[in-house]
Image (spheres, rainbow, N blue to C red):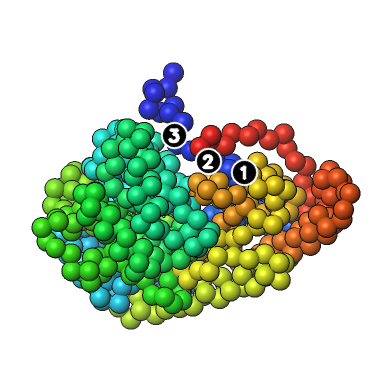
Amino acid sequence: MLSRKASCDSHGQDSSYFLGWQEYEKNPYHEVQNPNGIIQMGLAENQLSFDLLESWLASNTDALGLKRNGRSVFRELALFQDYHGFPAFKNELVEFMAKLRGYKVAFDPNKLVLMAGSTSANEILMFCLAEPGEAFLLPTPYYPGFDRDLKWRTGVEIVPIHCSSSNDFRITACALEEAYQRAQKLNLKVKGVLVTNPSNPLGSTLNRDELNHLIDFAIKKEVHIISDEIYSGTVFDSPSFISITEAVMEKHVDHETDLLGRIHIVYSLSKDLGLPGFRVGMIYSNNETVVAAATKMSSFGLVSSQTQFLLSNMLSDKKFTSKYIKENQRRLKKRKDMLVSGLRSAGIGCAKSNAGLFCWVDMRYLLRSDTFEAEKELWKRILFEVGLNISPGSSCHCSEPGWFRVCFANMSQETLKVAIRRIEVFAESSSSASGRENLSHQRSVRNSRRSLSKWVFPISSYNDHEPADR
Ligand SMILES: Cc1ncc(COP(=O)(O)O)c(C=O)c1O
Protein backbone atom coordinates (compact mmCIF):
# COMPACT_ATOMS: atom_id res chain seq x y z
CA MET A 1 0.00 0.00 0.00
CA LEU A 2 2.77 2.43 0.91
CA SER A 3 4.98 4.13 -1.64
CA ARG A 4 8.59 2.98 -1.96
CA LYS A 5 9.76 6.13 -0.22
CA ALA A 6 7.43 5.75 2.76
CA SER A 7 8.32 2.10 3.26
CA CYS A 8 12.07 2.47 2.59
CA ASP A 9 13.85 0.99 5.61
CA SER A 10 16.82 3.41 5.71
CA HIS A 11 14.84 5.26 8.43
CA GLY A 12 16.73 3.17 10.99
CA GLN A 13 13.72 2.53 13.23
CA ASP A 14 14.88 -1.05 13.79
CA SER A 15 18.06 0.18 15.41
CA SER A 16 18.43 -0.62 19.10
CA TYR A 17 18.48 3.17 19.63
CA PHE A 18 14.77 3.32 18.81
CA LEU A 19 13.93 -0.18 20.10
CA GLY A 20 15.23 0.81 23.52
CA TRP A 21 12.86 3.78 23.58
CA GLN A 22 9.94 1.47 22.79
CA GLU A 23 10.87 -0.80 25.69
CA TYR A 24 11.19 2.21 27.97
CA GLU A 25 7.74 3.43 27.00
CA LYS A 26 6.21 0.06 27.95
CA ASN A 27 7.71 0.20 31.42
CA PRO A 28 8.94 3.70 32.40
CA TYR A 29 10.60 4.20 35.78
CA HIS A 30 8.76 6.29 38.36
CA GLU A 31 10.15 6.88 41.82
CA VAL A 32 6.87 5.98 43.51
CA GLN A 33 4.53 4.40 40.96
CA ASN A 34 7.04 2.17 39.17
CA PRO A 35 10.35 2.01 41.06
CA ASN A 36 11.40 -1.12 39.17
CA GLY A 37 10.76 0.44 35.76
CA ILE A 38 13.28 1.25 33.05
CA ILE A 39 15.24 4.49 33.43
CA GLN A 40 15.57 6.39 30.16
CA MET A 41 19.26 7.13 29.56
CA GLY A 42 19.03 7.01 25.79
CA LEU A 43 17.53 10.45 25.30
CA ALA A 44 19.75 13.50 24.81
CA GLU A 45 17.41 15.96 26.48
CA ASN A 46 18.44 18.82 28.71
CA GLN A 47 16.06 19.24 31.64
CA LEU A 48 18.58 20.76 34.01
CA SER A 49 17.74 24.43 33.64
CA PHE A 50 13.98 24.58 33.22
CA ASP A 51 13.67 26.54 36.46
CA LEU A 52 15.73 29.37 34.91
CA LEU A 53 13.52 29.50 31.83
CA GLU A 54 10.37 29.33 33.96
CA SER A 55 11.45 32.11 36.24
CA TRP A 56 12.21 34.30 33.20
CA LEU A 57 8.70 33.54 31.87
CA ALA A 58 7.16 34.38 35.22
CA SER A 59 8.70 37.83 35.20
CA ASN A 60 8.06 38.48 31.49
CA THR A 61 4.37 37.81 31.21
CA ASP A 62 3.97 39.90 28.04
CA ALA A 63 6.11 37.49 26.04
CA LEU A 64 4.01 34.47 26.94
CA GLY A 65 0.76 36.46 26.73
CA LEU A 66 1.65 37.52 23.17
CA LYS A 67 1.78 41.20 24.07
CA ARG A 68 4.14 44.03 23.14
CA ASN A 69 4.24 46.95 25.57
CA GLY A 70 1.04 45.62 27.11
CA ARG A 71 -0.85 45.43 23.77
CA SER A 72 -1.87 42.18 22.14
CA VAL A 73 0.02 41.08 19.03
CA PHE A 74 -2.20 38.03 18.63
CA ARG A 75 -3.65 39.06 15.25
CA GLU A 76 -0.26 40.01 13.87
CA LEU A 77 1.18 36.63 14.88
CA ALA A 78 -1.82 34.65 13.73
CA LEU A 79 -1.48 36.04 10.21
CA PHE A 80 2.29 36.00 9.92
CA GLN A 81 3.43 33.53 7.27
CA ASP A 82 6.57 34.98 5.73
CA TYR A 83 8.95 32.06 5.39
CA HIS A 84 11.96 34.30 5.96
CA GLY A 85 11.07 34.46 9.65
CA PHE A 86 10.92 37.48 11.95
CA PRO A 87 13.99 39.72 11.39
CA ALA A 88 14.04 40.48 15.12
CA PHE A 89 14.22 36.77 15.97
CA LYS A 90 16.98 36.11 13.45
CA ASN A 91 18.97 39.06 14.83
CA GLU A 92 18.70 37.60 18.32
CA LEU A 93 19.68 34.13 17.12
CA VAL A 94 22.87 35.28 15.40
CA GLU A 95 23.77 37.33 18.47
CA PHE A 96 23.19 34.26 20.69
CA MET A 97 25.34 32.09 18.42
CA ALA A 98 28.15 34.66 18.52
CA LYS A 99 27.90 34.83 22.30
CA LEU A 100 28.26 31.05 22.59
CA ARG A 101 31.47 31.36 20.57
CA GLY A 102 32.90 34.08 22.81
CA TYR A 103 32.31 36.70 20.05
CA LYS A 104 35.28 35.32 18.14
CA VAL A 105 33.05 35.10 15.09
CA ALA A 106 30.11 37.19 13.90
CA PHE A 107 27.08 35.95 11.98
CA ASP A 108 24.92 37.73 9.41
CA PRO A 109 21.15 37.20 9.88
CA ASN A 110 20.70 37.24 6.08
CA LYS A 111 22.65 34.01 5.84
CA LEU A 112 20.45 32.22 8.34
CA VAL A 113 17.45 30.08 7.37
CA LEU A 114 14.96 29.04 10.04
CA MET A 115 13.88 25.39 10.15
CA ALA A 116 11.77 23.16 12.38
CA GLY A 117 14.77 21.85 14.34
CA SER A 118 18.18 20.54 13.30
CA THR A 119 16.48 17.39 12.00
CA SER A 120 14.86 19.44 9.30
CA ALA A 121 17.99 21.58 8.75
CA ASN A 122 20.20 18.55 8.14
CA GLU A 123 17.73 16.97 5.75
CA ILE A 124 17.26 20.17 3.78
CA LEU A 125 21.02 20.56 3.41
CA MET A 126 21.12 17.05 1.94
CA PHE A 127 18.37 17.97 -0.52
CA CYS A 128 20.27 21.12 -1.47
CA LEU A 129 23.76 19.65 -1.80
CA ALA A 130 23.44 16.07 -3.02
CA GLU A 131 21.58 13.97 -5.55
CA PRO A 132 20.08 10.63 -4.51
CA GLY A 133 22.91 8.09 -4.58
CA GLU A 134 25.62 10.66 -3.78
CA ALA A 135 27.36 10.48 -0.44
CA PHE A 136 28.38 12.35 2.70
CA LEU A 137 31.19 11.11 4.91
CA LEU A 138 30.48 10.98 8.67
CA PRO A 139 32.98 10.19 11.43
CA THR A 140 31.93 7.29 13.64
CA PRO A 141 30.49 6.97 16.18
CA TYR A 142 27.67 9.28 15.05
CA TYR A 143 24.17 10.34 16.20
CA PRO A 144 21.81 7.42 15.34
CA GLY A 145 19.13 9.82 14.04
CA PHE A 146 21.35 10.76 11.08
CA ASP A 147 20.32 7.62 9.18
CA ARG A 148 16.78 8.94 9.19
CA ASP A 149 17.62 12.64 8.80
CA LEU A 150 20.24 12.41 6.06
CA LYS A 151 19.33 9.28 4.11
CA TRP A 152 15.74 8.27 4.43
CA ARG A 153 13.78 10.70 2.27
CA THR A 154 16.71 12.14 0.30
CA GLY A 155 18.25 8.91 -0.99
CA VAL A 156 21.68 10.26 -0.01
CA GLU A 157 24.21 7.70 1.26
CA ILE A 158 26.33 7.91 4.41
CA VAL A 159 29.86 6.55 4.23
CA PRO A 160 31.42 6.18 7.69
CA ILE A 161 34.83 7.63 8.52
CA HIS A 162 36.06 4.96 10.90
CA CYS A 163 37.53 6.52 14.03
CA SER A 164 39.11 4.42 16.74
CA SER A 165 39.44 4.29 20.52
CA SER A 166 43.23 4.15 20.08
CA ASN A 167 43.22 7.96 19.61
CA ASP A 168 39.97 8.78 21.46
CA PHE A 169 37.95 8.54 18.24
CA ARG A 170 39.67 11.61 16.79
CA ILE A 171 39.32 12.40 13.07
CA THR A 172 42.59 11.89 11.19
CA ALA A 173 43.68 12.75 7.66
CA CYS A 174 44.19 9.03 7.05
CA ALA A 175 40.68 8.08 8.17
CA LEU A 176 39.20 10.80 5.94
CA GLU A 177 41.15 9.60 2.91
CA GLU A 178 40.31 5.97 3.63
CA ALA A 179 36.57 6.75 3.75
CA TYR A 180 36.85 8.74 0.53
CA GLN A 181 38.57 5.85 -1.25
CA ARG A 182 35.96 3.40 0.08
CA ALA A 183 33.17 5.62 -1.30
CA GLN A 184 34.89 5.73 -4.68
CA LYS A 185 35.14 1.94 -4.77
CA LEU A 186 31.39 1.84 -4.12
CA ASN A 187 30.93 4.26 -7.04
CA LEU A 188 29.56 6.92 -4.72
CA LYS A 189 30.33 10.54 -5.48
CA VAL A 190 31.37 12.25 -2.25
CA LYS A 191 29.70 15.64 -1.79
CA GLY A 192 30.97 16.46 1.65
CA VAL A 193 31.73 15.65 5.25
CA LEU A 194 29.25 16.14 8.09
CA VAL A 195 30.54 16.43 11.65
CA THR A 196 28.88 17.17 14.95
CA ASN A 197 30.90 19.57 17.05
CA PRO A 198 30.72 18.98 20.00
CA SER A 199 30.24 15.36 19.12
CA ASN A 200 27.16 13.31 19.79
CA PRO A 201 27.85 10.65 21.15
CA LEU A 202 31.43 11.38 22.32
CA GLY A 203 30.58 14.49 24.32
CA SER A 204 33.78 16.20 23.24
CA THR A 205 34.70 19.16 21.06
CA LEU A 206 36.73 18.80 17.88
CA ASN A 207 40.29 19.98 18.41
CA ARG A 208 42.22 22.29 16.10
CA ASP A 209 44.06 19.42 14.38
CA GLU A 210 40.81 17.68 13.52
CA LEU A 211 39.30 20.91 12.20
CA ASN A 212 42.41 21.55 10.11
CA HIS A 213 42.27 18.02 8.67
CA LEU A 214 38.65 18.64 7.70
CA ILE A 215 39.44 21.97 6.09
CA ASP A 216 42.42 20.57 4.15
CA PHE A 217 40.31 17.63 3.02
CA ALA A 218 37.44 19.85 1.86
CA ILE A 219 39.86 22.04 -0.10
CA LYS A 220 41.67 19.09 -1.67
CA LYS A 221 38.53 17.18 -2.68
CA GLU A 222 36.43 20.29 -3.37
CA VAL A 223 33.62 19.09 -1.12
CA HIS A 224 31.30 20.66 1.46
CA ILE A 225 31.63 20.71 5.24
CA ILE A 226 28.45 20.61 7.33
CA SER A 227 29.10 21.31 10.97
CA ASP A 228 26.17 20.39 13.22
CA GLU A 229 26.87 22.62 16.24
CA ILE A 230 23.66 21.84 18.12
CA TYR A 231 25.63 21.23 21.36
CA SER A 232 27.80 24.38 21.13
CA GLY A 233 26.29 25.90 24.28
CA THR A 234 26.87 22.80 26.39
CA VAL A 235 30.69 23.05 26.53
CA PHE A 236 31.27 22.91 30.28
CA ASP A 237 34.99 22.27 30.46
CA SER A 238 38.22 23.08 28.67
CA PRO A 239 39.33 22.92 25.91
CA SER A 240 36.92 25.55 24.70
CA PHE A 241 34.71 25.18 21.67
CA ILE A 242 36.16 26.07 18.25
CA SER A 243 33.49 26.55 15.62
CA ILE A 244 34.27 25.60 12.03
CA THR A 245 33.93 29.31 11.12
CA GLU A 246 36.61 30.28 13.60
CA ALA A 247 38.92 27.47 12.42
CA VAL A 248 38.59 28.59 8.79
CA MET A 249 39.19 32.24 9.69
CA GLU A 250 42.30 31.39 11.65
CA LYS A 251 43.71 29.17 8.94
CA HIS A 252 43.67 32.09 6.45
CA VAL A 253 42.30 29.90 3.70
CA ASP A 254 42.96 31.18 0.18
CA HIS A 255 39.76 32.82 -1.13
CA GLU A 256 40.22 31.16 -4.49
CA THR A 257 39.39 27.79 -2.99
CA ASP A 258 35.84 29.09 -2.42
CA LEU A 259 35.82 27.01 0.74
CA LEU A 260 33.67 29.52 2.62
CA GLY A 261 30.84 28.91 0.18
CA ARG A 262 31.01 25.22 0.98
CA ILE A 263 30.75 25.56 4.75
CA HIS A 264 27.33 25.24 6.38
CA ILE A 265 26.44 25.29 10.06
CA VAL A 266 23.41 23.59 11.57
CA TYR A 267 22.10 24.77 14.91
CA SER A 268 18.98 24.52 17.07
CA LEU A 269 17.69 25.46 20.49
CA SER A 270 16.77 21.85 21.33
CA LYS A 271 19.85 21.14 23.47
CA ASP A 272 21.36 24.43 24.66
CA LEU A 273 18.01 25.82 25.83
CA GLY A 274 16.42 22.39 26.30
CA LEU A 275 13.51 23.21 23.97
CA PRO A 276 13.18 20.33 21.48
CA GLY A 277 9.39 20.67 21.58
CA PHE A 278 9.57 24.23 20.24
CA ARG A 279 11.21 23.00 16.99
CA VAL A 280 13.62 25.88 16.47
CA GLY A 281 16.51 25.06 14.18
CA MET A 282 18.50 26.73 11.44
CA ILE A 283 21.00 26.51 8.63
CA TYR A 284 23.71 29.13 8.50
CA SER A 285 25.49 29.23 5.15
CA ASN A 286 27.84 31.60 3.35
CA ASN A 287 26.52 30.29 0.09
CA GLU A 288 23.78 32.56 -1.31
CA THR A 289 22.44 29.86 -3.60
CA VAL A 290 22.12 27.40 -0.72
CA VAL A 291 20.45 30.05 1.46
CA ALA A 292 17.92 30.81 -1.30
CA ALA A 293 17.13 27.13 -1.99
CA ALA A 294 16.92 26.24 1.70
CA THR A 295 14.61 29.21 2.32
CA LYS A 296 12.23 27.93 -0.36
CA MET A 297 12.34 24.45 1.13
CA SER A 298 11.79 25.77 4.65
CA SER A 299 8.07 26.19 3.82
CA PHE A 300 7.66 22.55 4.78
CA GLY A 301 8.94 23.07 8.31
CA LEU A 302 8.70 26.64 9.55
CA VAL A 303 9.00 27.84 13.12
CA SER A 304 5.61 29.07 14.37
CA SER A 305 5.24 32.82 14.79
CA GLN A 306 4.35 32.67 18.50
CA THR A 307 7.50 30.62 19.19
CA GLN A 308 9.60 33.18 17.31
CA PHE A 309 7.94 36.00 19.23
CA LEU A 310 8.43 34.40 22.64
CA LEU A 311 12.04 33.40 22.03
CA SER A 312 13.12 36.66 20.45
CA ASN A 313 11.94 38.34 23.66
CA MET A 314 13.83 35.84 25.78
CA LEU A 315 17.06 36.02 23.76
CA SER A 316 16.98 39.82 23.72
CA ASP A 317 17.43 39.76 27.50
CA LYS A 318 21.23 39.65 27.43
CA LYS A 319 21.60 39.54 31.18
CA PHE A 320 19.38 36.48 31.26
CA THR A 321 21.16 34.64 28.41
CA SER A 322 24.59 35.22 29.98
CA LYS A 323 23.39 33.89 33.31
CA TYR A 324 21.58 30.96 31.70
CA ILE A 325 24.54 29.82 29.58
CA LYS A 326 26.92 29.89 32.54
CA GLU A 327 24.60 28.23 35.03
CA ASN A 328 23.44 25.58 32.57
CA GLN A 329 27.05 24.62 31.82
CA ARG A 330 27.83 24.46 35.53
CA ARG A 331 24.92 22.09 36.12
CA LEU A 332 25.85 19.91 33.14
CA LYS A 333 29.40 19.57 34.43
CA LYS A 334 28.16 18.61 37.87
CA ARG A 335 25.91 15.93 36.38
CA LYS A 336 28.60 14.58 34.13
CA ASP A 337 31.05 14.40 37.06
CA MET A 338 28.43 12.56 39.10
CA LEU A 339 27.91 9.95 36.38
CA VAL A 340 31.62 9.54 35.66
CA SER A 341 32.53 9.06 39.32
CA GLY A 342 29.60 6.67 39.86
CA LEU A 343 30.69 4.59 36.90
CA ARG A 344 34.30 4.72 38.02
CA SER A 345 33.34 3.32 41.40
CA ALA A 346 31.67 0.47 39.48
CA GLY A 347 34.95 -0.06 37.62
CA ILE A 348 33.61 1.40 34.37
CA GLY A 349 35.51 4.07 32.45
CA CYS A 350 34.32 6.86 30.18
CA ALA A 351 35.96 8.65 27.29
CA LYS A 352 37.21 12.07 28.40
CA SER A 353 34.53 14.63 27.63
CA ASN A 354 33.92 18.36 27.96
CA ALA A 355 30.45 18.89 26.47
CA GLY A 356 27.06 17.43 25.65
CA LEU A 357 24.34 15.69 27.59
CA PHE A 358 25.92 12.20 27.67
CA CYS A 359 29.04 10.20 28.31
CA TRP A 360 30.65 7.69 25.96
CA VAL A 361 31.09 4.72 28.22
CA ASP A 362 33.57 1.88 27.83
CA MET A 363 32.00 -1.45 28.81
CA ARG A 364 34.30 -3.62 26.71
CA TYR A 365 35.40 -5.65 29.69
CA LEU A 366 31.81 -6.69 30.36
CA LEU A 367 31.47 -8.29 26.91
CA ARG A 368 31.45 -12.06 26.64
CA SER A 369 33.44 -11.74 23.41
CA ASP A 370 34.77 -8.91 21.28
CA THR A 371 31.78 -8.90 18.91
CA PHE A 372 28.67 -6.86 18.17
CA GLU A 373 26.55 -9.90 19.10
CA ALA A 374 28.07 -9.75 22.58
CA GLU A 375 27.45 -6.00 22.69
CA LYS A 376 23.80 -6.54 21.83
CA GLU A 377 23.56 -9.26 24.48
CA LEU A 378 24.99 -6.89 27.08
CA TRP A 379 22.68 -4.09 25.93
CA LYS A 380 19.64 -6.38 26.38
CA ARG A 381 20.78 -7.39 29.85
CA ILE A 382 21.22 -3.76 30.83
CA LEU A 383 17.81 -2.91 29.39
CA PHE A 384 15.80 -5.82 30.80
CA GLU A 385 17.68 -6.93 33.91
CA VAL A 386 19.22 -3.69 35.11
CA GLY A 387 16.40 -1.49 33.83
CA LEU A 388 18.43 1.15 32.00
CA ASN A 389 17.90 2.19 28.42
CA ILE A 390 21.31 3.21 27.09
CA SER A 391 22.41 3.32 23.45
CA PRO A 392 24.85 0.67 22.22
CA GLY A 393 27.77 1.87 20.10
CA SER A 394 26.51 -0.22 17.18
CA SER A 395 23.48 2.09 16.90
CA CYS A 396 25.99 4.94 16.50
CA HIS A 397 27.89 2.88 13.90
CA CYS A 398 30.91 2.62 16.16
CA SER A 399 33.41 0.20 14.63
CA GLU A 400 34.45 -1.30 17.99
CA PRO A 401 32.04 -3.31 20.17
CA GLY A 402 31.56 -2.48 23.83
CA TRP A 403 30.93 1.29 23.86
CA PHE A 404 27.63 2.80 25.02
CA ARG A 405 26.17 6.31 25.07
CA VAL A 406 24.68 7.15 28.46
CA CYS A 407 22.62 10.36 28.87
CA PHE A 408 22.59 12.23 32.17
CA ALA A 409 20.59 15.45 31.75
CA ASN A 410 17.06 14.16 31.09
CA MET A 411 16.27 13.06 34.65
CA SER A 412 16.37 14.24 38.25
CA GLN A 413 19.50 13.86 40.34
CA GLU A 414 17.70 11.26 42.46
CA THR A 415 16.91 9.15 39.39
CA LEU A 416 20.52 9.37 38.26
CA LYS A 417 21.57 8.08 41.69
CA VAL A 418 19.23 5.11 41.31
CA ALA A 419 20.67 4.42 37.85
CA ILE A 420 24.23 4.55 39.16
CA ARG A 421 23.36 2.18 42.02
CA ARG A 422 21.88 -0.28 39.54
CA ILE A 423 25.01 -0.16 37.38
CA GLU A 424 27.23 -0.69 40.43
CA VAL A 425 25.34 -3.83 41.44
CA PHE A 426 25.33 -5.08 37.87
CA ALA A 427 29.05 -4.51 37.29
CA GLU A 428 29.89 -6.14 40.61
CA SER A 429 27.77 -9.21 39.92
CA SER A 430 29.06 -9.47 36.35
CA SER A 431 32.72 -9.27 37.27
CA SER A 432 32.41 -11.70 40.17
CA ALA A 433 30.52 -14.08 37.89
CA SER A 434 33.12 -13.89 35.13
CA GLY A 435 35.94 -14.33 37.66
CA ARG A 436 34.68 -17.74 38.71
CA GLU A 437 36.40 -20.31 36.59
CA ASN A 438 34.46 -23.30 35.28
CA LEU A 439 31.22 -21.44 35.65
CA SER A 440 29.14 -21.64 32.53
CA HIS A 441 27.82 -18.41 31.09
CA GLN A 442 24.26 -19.58 31.74
CA ARG A 443 24.96 -19.87 35.43
CA SER A 444 26.71 -16.55 35.73
CA VAL A 445 23.72 -14.86 34.13
CA ARG A 446 21.46 -16.64 36.65
CA ASN A 447 23.64 -15.48 39.54
CA SER A 448 23.75 -11.91 38.44
CA ARG A 449 20.00 -11.94 37.99
CA ARG A 450 19.60 -13.13 41.54
CA SER A 451 21.53 -10.16 42.94
CA LEU A 452 19.60 -7.85 40.67
CA SER A 453 16.30 -9.24 41.84
CA LYS A 454 15.06 -5.80 42.89
CA TRP A 455 14.57 -4.81 39.28
CA VAL A 456 14.39 -8.03 37.35
CA PHE A 457 12.30 -8.09 34.19
CA PRO A 458 11.40 -10.99 31.97
CA ILE A 459 13.53 -10.90 28.85
CA SER A 460 10.86 -10.57 26.23
CA SER A 461 10.96 -12.62 23.08
CA TYR A 462 12.95 -9.98 21.38
CA ASN A 463 13.43 -9.78 17.64
CA ASP A 464 16.88 -8.86 16.44
CA HIS A 465 16.57 -6.39 13.63
CA GLU A 466 19.93 -4.64 13.76
CA PRO A 467 20.76 -3.44 10.25
CA ALA A 468 23.53 -5.48 8.67
CA ASP A 469 26.08 -2.68 8.33
CA ARG A 470 26.13 -1.76 12.02
C1 LIG B 1 23.78 15.88 16.52
C2 LIG B 1 22.30 16.11 16.48
N1 LIG B 1 21.76 16.72 15.41
C3 LIG B 1 20.44 16.93 15.34
C4 LIG B 1 19.57 16.52 16.34
C5 LIG B 1 18.09 16.80 16.20
O1 LIG B 1 17.74 17.93 16.94
P1 LIG B 1 16.38 18.77 16.76
O2 LIG B 1 15.57 18.50 17.98
O3 LIG B 1 16.82 20.21 16.72
O4 LIG B 1 15.74 18.36 15.51
C6 LIG B 1 20.09 15.87 17.48
C7 LIG B 1 19.20 15.42 18.55
O5 LIG B 1 19.54 14.60 19.37
C8 LIG B 1 21.49 15.67 17.55
O6 LIG B 1 22.05 15.07 18.60
Give the mark nearer the N terminus: 1 vs 2.
Answer: 1
Mark 1 or 3: the one toward you: 1
Q: Amino acid at mark 1?
A: Phe
In this rendering, would 79 be left or right of 17? left
Labels 1 and 2 touching (C-beta < 8 A): yes
- Residue 215: tell me if it is visible: yes
Circle 1 packing at 10 Å, graded few (<14), some (14-19), many (20+), is some
In this rendering, would 224 be left or right of 54? left
Residue 372 badge: 1
Q: Amino acid at mark 3?
A: Ser
- Disc 1 versus disc 3: distance between alpha carbons? 20 Å
The one nearer the camera, 334 or 256, is: 256
CB of residue at label 3: within 8 Å of ligand 1? no
- Disc 3 versus disc 2: distance between alpha carbons? 12 Å
Q: Where residue 433 sits in the image (x, y, percent)?
A: 83, 55
Indicate the quadrant where residue 349 lies: bottom right
Q: Residue at x 53, y 41 (%)?
A: 470
Q: From the viewer's perspective, is residue 321 above or below residue 45?
A: below
Mark 3 or 2: the one toward you: 2
Residue 10 badge: 3
Q: Residue at x 45, y 50 (%)?
A: 162
Give the mark nearer the N terminus: 1 vs 3.
Answer: 3
Residue 470 badge: 2
Labels 1 and 3 touching (C-beta < 8 A): no
